[in-house]
Amino acid sequence: MTLVVSPQGETQKIGTIEQAFYWLRKKWPVTDHDRDLALDYVDAAMHCLVTVGTARNAFLSAAKTAGFMPGHTSAETPATF
């Protein structure tokens, strides 16, 4: 998935669950319930306790509350984390 991470339109591709975990821990602009929940779900998915889809949905919810917008991706690009 690609997120628009700045008002200038800079984007960041999150292609692996490890990248999602890193961004949530080190680069996230807010610490709120949605971020904490996403961290829990991403960690659980890394340990095969929940599905990656569940972790992805939690990550997207946290991204929305952090002010990140989904970026445009090519229809031919396979889904990643």
Image: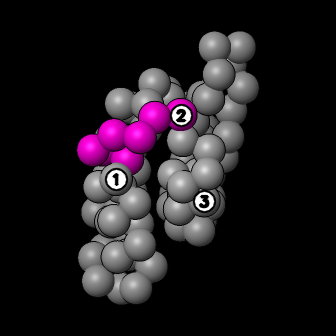
Residue at image location 53% in from the left, 62% down from the top: 21
Rendered location of residue 54, percent (x, y):
28, 63
The reply to whether residue 15 is in sight is yes
Q: Amino acid at mark 1?
A: Asp
Residue at image location 30% in from the left, 44% down from the top: 34
Looking at the picture, the colour scheme in use is one colour
Q: Secondary structure at mark 2?
A: loop
The reply to whether residue 80 is in sight is no
Callouts 3 and 2 close, C-beta under 8 Å: no
Residue at image location 60% in from the left, 59% down from the top: 22
Of residue 5 and residue 27, the one placed in the foreground of this image is: 27
Of residue 72 and residue 24, the one placed in the foreground of this image is: 24
Callouts 1 and 2 close, C-beta under 8 Å: no
What number is the disc on residue 22?
A: 3
Label 3 crowd bin: few (<14), some (14–19), many (20+), radius 10 Å: some
**Magenta stretch bounds:** 29-35
